[in-house]
């Protein structure tokens, strides 16, 4: 079938395009054309999603039957997609757990019992929630919204896991939060991508929390995998939360994937029963980490997308913290 990826050249979208090609679809990607080319075999369509004329012009009569939307960042983008693609048989949309009003800190229960944002401000969560309503209203039971959590894997330009791999590979004494037993859950982009294509093929509808299963690992377990896979001699230096915050360490940014205890205690408690029932896989975390490291060793690191913070603990801040321990 003809499958359109809104996105398709960067991270999750690239894996979606690859999965769709492998499943035998005629694939096109629609991007602004600034982040590279799609996988070989996919046709590259270009335009600005915020321009209502751009997508119809780019399609030029090529009528997609399926859509996987990985790039909706504005309310206009959602409205324009709804207007331009009325005849599709299945529309799988990548939303976020941030669409929920109370995440973080959560917990997040079954999808139907959790309230999403209904405000008009331009924060990430409310925009995703509004896009869900707009697209859901247009496509009805053919519309699936995947409320994604933390996505990892090769081609990740956000570089959160990647920063830890790079830092741990350098070895020596490494500042880590004194919270190594905190739970954490991730989904591999390749698992999510293939599943999204399958959901679009089936015309599956509804909301689904798409992250890894509860209890899959801990913060410390993830860092241990990074140490093992990079062959590092890194020595953890756990620093208490209050000391990190007092020193100006920004949670999630300076120490990627770290949340203060008040949020972390429930933020990773996400009900994924529906995702598991619909077949969302969860490959071994070791494979995700190893494949990410292998990709980093063999490819140039892409730039962090506009509007995203550069992850990682500044060297001078780490040195100051190490000096006190």
Image (cartoon, helix red, strand yellow):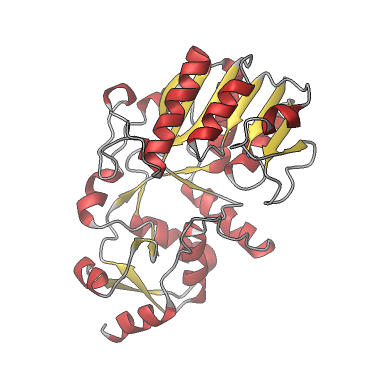
Query: Does residue 51 appear in this view?
Result: yes
Q: Residue furthest bottom?
A: 323
Q: Position of residue 280 (x, y in %)?
A: 48, 30
Question: Is the C terminus in the top left, top right, bottom left or bottom right quadrant?
Answer: bottom left
Q: Position of residue 119 (x, y in %)?
A: 32, 34
Could you tell whether 8 is left or right of 135 in the image?
right
Query: Does residue 96 appear in this view?
Result: no
Residue 309 drawn above or below residue 24? below
Q: Position of residue 213 (x, y in %)?
A: 37, 37
Q: Position of residue 271 (x, y in %)?
A: 32, 32
Could you tell whether 298 is left or right of 250 in the image?
right
* Numbered marks: total: 0
- Which residue is rendered at x = 51% and y = 20% of the image? 143
Residue 136 drawn above or below residue 50? above
In this view of the protein, which residue sits in the foreground, 97 or 322? 97
Could you tell whether 170 is left or right of 174 in the image?
right
Could you tell whether 5 is left or right of 206 in the image?
right
């Amino acid at each position: 079938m003809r499958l359109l990826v809104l996105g398709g050249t960067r991270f999750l979208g690239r894996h979606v395009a690859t999965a769709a090609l492998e499943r035998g679809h005629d694939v096109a990607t629609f991007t602004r054309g600034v982040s590279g080319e799609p996988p070989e075999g996919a046709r590259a369509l270009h335009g600005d999603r915020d321009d209502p004329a751009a997508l119809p012009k780019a399609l030029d009569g090529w009528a997609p039957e399926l859509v996987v939307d990985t790039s909706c960042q504005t309310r206009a983008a959602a409205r324009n997609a709804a207007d331009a693609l009325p005849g599709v048989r299945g529309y799988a949309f990548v939303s976020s757990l941030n669409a929920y009003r109370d995440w973080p800190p959560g917990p997040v229960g079954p999808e139907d019992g959790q309230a999403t944002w209904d405000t008009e401000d331009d924060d990430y969560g409310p925009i995703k929630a509004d896009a869900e309503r707009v697209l859901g209203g247009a496509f009805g039971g053919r519309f699936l919204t995947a409320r994604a959590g933390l996505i990892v894997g090769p081609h990740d330009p956000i570089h959160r896991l990647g920063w830890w791999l790079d830092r741990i590979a350098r070895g020596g004494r490494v500042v880590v939060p004194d919270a190594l037993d905190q739970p954490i859950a991730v989904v591999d982009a390749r698992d999510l991508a293939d599943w999204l294509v399958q959901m679009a093929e089936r015309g599956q509808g509804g909301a689904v929390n798409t992250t890894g299963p509860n209890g899959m690992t801990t913060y410390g377990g993830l860092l241990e995998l990074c140490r093992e896979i990079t062959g590092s001699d890194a020595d953890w230096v756990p620093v208490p939360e209050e000391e990190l915050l007092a020193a100006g360490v920004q949670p999630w940014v300076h120490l990627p994937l770290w949340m203060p205890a008040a949020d972390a205690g429930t933020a990773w408690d996400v009900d994924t029963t529906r995702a598991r029932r619909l077949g969302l896989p969860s490959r071994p975390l070791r494979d995700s980490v190893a494949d990410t490291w292998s990709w980093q060793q063999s490819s140039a690191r892409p730039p962090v997308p506009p509007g995203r913070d550069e992850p990682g603990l500044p060297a001078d801040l780490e040195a100051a913290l190490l000096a006190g321990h």
